[in-house]
Amino acid sequence: MLVGDSLFELVPPHPLEGLNVVNAGFGGATAAHVYASVASSVVSSALKANPPSKAIIQVGTNDSKAGADSSAVAEKTMAIGKLFRDIGTEPIIFAIPPIEENKTAFRSASVAAAINDATRQASLRNGVPFIDPYLTIRGSNDVTEDGIHLARHAIIALVEAIRAA
């Protein structure tokens, strides 16, 4: 199961053929939005009735605004992971991609990096796998189309990480 924001929502289904994937990404979602959705009685009941084997969680991109509390985002991410762990699903946390500030005024690259650092540390403390699917493309140009949403080669890196997880 893919759990997150538009970065997951926009993953095309054909590269994931052969996998049994439910894509629960939804545009504009913050970590708090995703937590509220998963914790809702309707979604929670459905997940308990048919728990996925794994939940790949990638949240924080929409939280990466100046002044955001990276520790709070990391803790909310861990809370999402706990909701899945409590139903027997293995949570896997993905890092958020780099933000290209020259293409967007709505997100902060330094806040995104701080969210990733805080989430990595929280994952270690909680024994939850943390994977950075963008490791090989961090620092390169044109990772995104608009500063936030992934360019084609970044989507390929994300899909490869999903398939490997």
Image (cartoon, grey):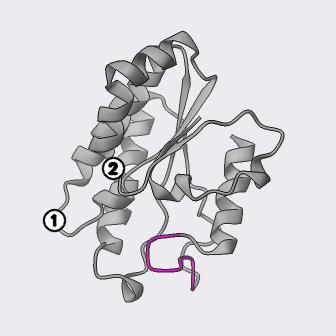
Crowding at mark 2 (Cα within 10 Å: few <14, some 14-19, many 20+): some
- Residue 30's x, y, as percent? 31, 50
Q: Which residue is mark 2?
A: 118
At 28% from the left and 47% from the top, the residue drawn is 73
**Relative height, residue 136 to residue 39 (above, below):** below
Drawn side of residue 120 relative to residue 12, left or right: left
Report if residue 146 lies within the magenta region.
yes
Question: Which of 73 and 36 lies nearest the eye of the viewer?
Answer: 36
Tag on residue 67? 1
The local secondary structure at tag 2 comes to helix
* Residue 143 figure quarter: bottom right
Residue 112 point in image, percent of width and height: 35, 64
Identified by mark 2, the residue type is Ala
Q: Earlier in the sequence, mark 2 or mark 1?
A: 1
What is the residue that sits farthest to the bottom in this orientation? 102
Q: Position of residue 13 (x, y in %)?
A: 71, 51
| Residue type, mark 1 in image | Gly
Please tell me whether mark 2 or mark 1 is closer to you in this view: 1
Between the C-alphas of marks 2 and 1, the distance is 15 Å
Task: Give the residue at x 42% y 56%.
Answer: 27
In magenta, the rendered stretch is: 142-149
Is residue 93 placed above or below 47 in the rendered structure?
below
